[in-house]
Amino acid sequence: MDILKIKAVVFDCDGVMFDTAVANRKYYDEVLQSFDKPALNDEQFINIHMMTVNKAIGYLFPEMGDLSIVYDYLKNIGYHKFIQDMVMEKGLKELLIKLKDNGYIRGIATNRTNTMERVLEDFHLEDYFEAVVTAAMVKKPKPDPEQLLLIMERFELKPDEILFIGDSDYDRQAAASAKVGFAAFKNSKLKADFNVDSMDEIARILQIN
């Protein structure tokens, strides 16, 4: 892709902006334990990392026809107490400042539903993004491209004017369907326009380091 055409850089949240492995595992393990189920195994953890909460609960409780009791429990425990276990990616704020200084639109496309606003508040990132699109704002979450298409529509962007940074196959599929540029973050197995391991590498690719 032509780097000079890029006008917007869009980030996935979990696994890109933040290392959420500990937080997410604690959250789902507490849910499972409350229903006398074993803690997440590695395969389950990898799968739920890409999913919305609703899809993850359906995946973890396939034997339950009515999941309302689980959702009621989720409302009681909330996710907020687990945000303290999230670790912001080194260099994220610095990259976001450079992007603004160089005129880029900064966005988020995440399969989180109702926790993204609190995460941004807790890490003082509320003013660092021009667009935040969660799974709750679209009919179909990733791997559907709707989140990226919404950002394109809102800012009147063409596909080759967006670089989406993600770490999962859901992210790759969404980028491919939207026909936008894709940078795979800390996941060399993903087919991408760029494979990067740090925020500094993204800055170098965009020539704003």
Image (spheres, rainbow, N blue to C red):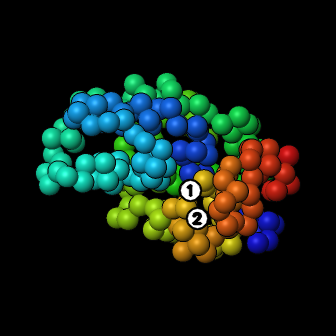
Query: Residue 189, located in which quarter of the rendered image?
Result: bottom right
Please state the horizontal and vertical placement of residue 69, each as a whole percent of the image. 15, 41
Q: Residue at x 27, y 37 (%)?
A: 37
Q: Residues within 10 Å of mark 2 (few under 14, many from 20)?
A: many
Q: Residue at x 68, y 72 (%)?
A: 160
Please state the horizontal and vertical placement of residue 39, each as a whole percent of the image. 36, 35
| Residue nearer the viewer, 138 or 74 | 74
Please state the horizontal and vertical placement of residue 10, each as a whole percent of the image. 61, 55
Query: Residue 184, located in which quarter of the rendered image?
Result: bottom right
| Residue nearer the viewer, 22 or 76 | 22
Q: Is residue 46 above or below residue 32?
A: below
- Element marked by disc 1: loop
Q: Residue at x 52, y 55 (%)?
A: 109
Q: Does residue 74 appear to the left or right of 79 in the view shown?
A: left
Q: Is residue 87 above or below residue 63?
A: above
Q: Quadrant of the N terminus?
A: bottom right
Residue that mark 2 sits on:
172
Amino acid identity at mark 1: Ser
Is residue 148 among the parts visible in the rendering?
no
- Element marked by disc 2: helix
| Residue nearer the viewer, 23 or 188 | 188
Residue 168's mark?
A: 1
Q: Does residue 61 appear to the left or right of 12 in the view shown?
A: left
Q: Residue at x 85, y 46 (%)?
A: 209
Please state the horizontal and vertical placement of residue 195, each as a whole percent of the image. 74, 58
Label pair 1/2, CB-CB below 8 angstroms: yes
Amino acid identity at mark 2: Arg
Q: Residues within 10 Å of mark 1 (few under 14, many from 20)?
A: many
